[in-house]
Amino acid sequence: MARKETETKPVLEMVQADGADEGCVTFVLHEEDHTLGNSLRYMVMKNPQVEFCGYSIPHPSETKINFRIQSRGGVPATDLLRKGLKDLQDAAQHVRTTFEAKVMDCKDQPQGPMQ
Amino acid sequence: MAAPMSNVDEIRKRVILSEFGVRNVHTTDYPGNYPGYDDAWSLQKFKKNFRIEVVHMDDTSMEFDMIGVDAALANAFRRILLAEVPTMAVEKVFVYNNTSIIQDEILAHRLGLIPIKADPRLFEYRNAGAEFRDEEGTEIDTIQLQLKVKCTRNPRATKESSDPRELYLNHMVYSKDMKWVPIGNQADVFADAQIGPVHDDILLAQLRPGQELDVVMHCVKGIGKDHAKFSPVATASYRLLPEITLLQTVEGEKAERLKRCFSPGVIELENRGGKQVAKVVNSRLDTCSREVLRHDDLKNLVKLGRVRDHFIFSVESTGILPPDVLVTEAISVLVAKCQKFLNELDSTEME
């Protein structure tokens, strides 16, 4: 059955100025908005090797964000992005386990902290 | 009165509510901003400082405190709760007969907004191009519901009555009239789960004798970003914990007036040496109206602020999933987003 090839939509693109080192990269994240943008920006900024980190939404009608990372000391920006994502994921997982444990405690004691 | 915070601590940890604005709003504790502070991200430090307290939880709503997290993360959870936790909702309405006064599209719109009690984790998303290729919904991604009501005159009504409840049969179409029609093996898989609307008493349309509604609905899995009908929460919001510090002892009549400036229960008067002295008892109850700053003689006696990393979340579910499950799902969505980009980074590295 002849049908259009399922579009391989890019999820993550990298835009790098010619000649610049690997430490300054703008990532274009597709199908994302402030939800991931702001939380990822916070995590990347918490890294002392980051000189600059910011994100913007080029147009509100398009769901993509421009995420720029500039590193201090020549560290590749992809490593910083990877670390930021990993840190965000670890933090979220810890929040989830703590929350589930607390909810389990609450359900076990009906007279407990719940009103 | 607590010992006053140093200036730096205050900038780092408090949002200040002053008469003409709110100050210190943004997070500033990034590495390098404050000499002598190590603000680099450390999972150990985060785990040590992070706490959750559940204040209230029942089937439809919960209130819990998330302490030790930054606004960016808390806001991400809130946004995901509103827009990215999937649910099932009516998407396609096949109108076989509608002689009621409600137009087809209005009725379809109303049907879409009804919360459907079906665990969305047990279903798949429908393929994006499926409609164009005219594929019927399969049992793993579609729930079929049917609404078939005909209004007739009640033969047993008395001659002079004018009450529609007596004169007509089936003249009000409620959501309880929506019946589940199992497709494929759904009858076995969901034998004990009652799939249908969460609430029975949502009024969909009103009919008069001779009018009828014969409608088949297909429910699919979707997220709130696509259409608000897929949002699993009535609302999800958070606020920061208020903090009220009295800078001087306030007694007598001023104490009475100070008490009235805040929400009830925040400030109580205690008897100390024969005088009524104001004391901050429970600043959590305050709605931060800053009323006290409107009175010239009271405004310099208090300091209003909010604790920057203490979030009081309030999650109200529409009934599809219990609120604690919703919060867990929302956090899982954030984890999955990170994983998606980590995989993407790793795969581009391989090339």
Image: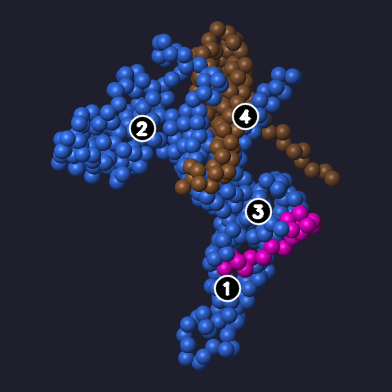
Chain colours: A brown, B blue
Please name the residue that numbered disc 2 is placed on. B306
**Looking at the image, is mark 3 or mark 2 earlier in the sequence?**
3
Callout 2–callout 4 Cβ contact below 8 Å: no
Q: Position of residue B209 (x, y in %)?
A: 58, 81
Please identify the residue farthest to the bottom as the structure is shown. B159
At 57% from the left and 61% from the top, the residue drawn is: B199
- The CA distance from mark 3 to mark 4 is 27 Å
10 Å crowding of disc 3: few (<14), some (14-19), many (20+): many
Q: Nearer the viewer, residue B92 or B319?
A: B319
Q: Amino acid at mark 4?
A: Cys
10 Å crowding of disc 1: few (<14), some (14-19), many (20+): some
* For discs 2 and 1, the disc positioned in front in the rendered view: 2
Q: How many marks?
A: 4
Q: What number is the disc on residue B100?
A: 1
Q: Quadrant of residue A107?
A: top right
Please name the residue that numbered disc 4 is placed on. B338
Q: Which residues are magenta?
A: B174-191
Name the element at disc 2.
Answer: strand
